[in-house]
Image (cartoon, rainbow, N blue to C red):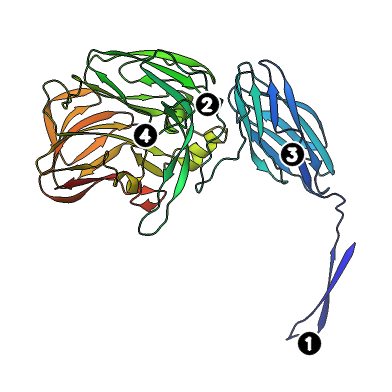
Amino acid sequence: MTTYIKAMRFPHSGFLLLLLYALTSTSAWALSANLSSNTINLATGETGSFTISGNDDGRDQFQFRWDIPAGLTVSKGSSSNLNKFEVDYEKMRVKVETNARGSFSATIKVSANSSGSFNLINTRAEIDLDPANVSVNVGGSVSEPVVEPPADETGGSTGGATEPAPEATNADYTFYVSSGQVDITASPDSGNGATSLPVWGYTDVAGGAGRVPGPIIEMVEGQTVTVEVINNHNRNHNFVVQGMSSDTTAIAPGSRRTYTLNANRSGVFMYSDTLSNGVNQALGLFGAVIVRPSAGSNRAWSNAPSADHQRLWVITDMDVPRWNNVAVGGGNVNTGSYRPNYFLMNGMNGFQAMGDANTNLEGNVGDLFLVRIVNAGQFDQSLHFHSNHFRVISRNGNRLGQFVWQDTINVKAGTTAMVLYQLNQPGHYPMHVHTAQMETGNGVYLNGTAAMIIAH
């Protein structure tokens, strides 16, 4: 027992009061906690385990939690000196709470009925736990991923990807699903905003990082093409083209699937991964299909006006802290809460897009642009063009018999549109979204949805 005596003189009483504080220290253990293993390799259906053990301070209870990923079965093993030890599949988590008795331990058993890589991400550790996460690899085709905590907004984490599957053979297009990142540039005025966003995406490079958006598929009306999709990621994915395909079959990690697309009409269409309640698409698994009336045509369809230039704008929004970081870290995204803080055009933030020749509308006065727009995000975006009105000629694949003159077009989430815009006077003008938040990247203006209109 350690005793402290403190003397205090109250100036108006003239009395000296002695205040006695008795502080008793009974701790006999140094706080510690560790995992027996942070990587478990299993065959399909086999059960493995890991153990958390250590010492609390003998006076207080301490808690640990892990999120349970979909597809992994978790159950309780042996334990000692615990106040709580529970597996809660309603909340998809396992909880361990010590009982203030010094040493403690809990063995957690894991198994899965299909091959894949599963990450138990620690969401609470009241005693330091490093490493805190557990990687469970099931089956022989998946390599051991690098286990990382969820990334924060100042740095991206790409999560674990499987080894590249064998090269494709005869398909017209070959896409690979893998993790990647989107680099956000800083504001040239303030220098703020630079970061990297962790994403998942399609790429046409074997072993390459996922791209956002994915590669463009180009077709001619009446043509049939095949697309082979190889899953180099550690989760199930698929590939669906709006208006062209309806096969939603999951492609397991390390597996592949071939799709046949028939271009029955000209236009612009979106492809995406429709699994995981929108999470896979929101992380970046989407892209565009452009169908022209004939090879090299500069028309939206055979009898539409002839354009001098063509542009494709694929726009999206991302909730990085609550969706990207959680999903990439192996956790379960709460899809009931979505508050995007980044808004991209062609995979670029505003300052990048406004300097990109393939995004901006730049030409001579009188030039006509055909702009194809795909909204792959979860929020509608109202795009406002300065300098001149434009004609809306198609909405979500439906050609308008009478073109509509507008200066702002609201493109609904998950839909497409096509517009004709003509440069009518020299100068530099903005194209921006008509929602203030969407003009920013995590609050930095003008790092959201934006492009330039430049007429010479």
**Is residue 348 found left or right of 298 in the rendered image?**
right
**Whole-Å distance between the Cαs marked 4 and 3?**
40 Å
**Lower sequence index among marks 4 and 3:** 3
Position in image of residue 175 (x %, y %): 42, 22
Q: Is residue 69 above or below residue 221?
A: below
- Dot 4: what SS? loop
Q: Which residue is mark 3?
A: 97
Q: Would you name the residue on which mark 1 appears?
A: 14
Q: CA distance from mark 3 to mark 2?
A: 34 Å
In which quadrant will I find the N terminus?
Answer: bottom right
Q: Amino acid at mark 4?
A: Gly
* Circle 1: residue type: Gly
The alpha-carbon separation of the residues under discs 1 and 4 comes to 74 Å
- Mark earlier in primary sequence (1, 2): 1
Disc 2 secondary structure class: loop
Residue at 11% over, 21% down: 303
Residue 69 spot, x, y in % from top left: 60, 28
Q: Position of residue 104 (x, y in %)?
A: 82, 38
Q: Name the kind of residue labelled 3 in the image.
A: Glu
Q: Determine which quarter of the picture holds residue 105.
A: top right
Would residue 58 be visible to someone looking at this image? yes
Mark 4 lies on residue: 377
Does the residue at mark 1 contact the one at mark 4 (Cβ under 8 Å)? Answer: no
Q: Amino acid at mark 2?
A: His
Residue at 51 percent across and 18 percent down: it is: 166
The residue at which mark 2 appears reads as 233
Residues 412 and 47: in front is 47
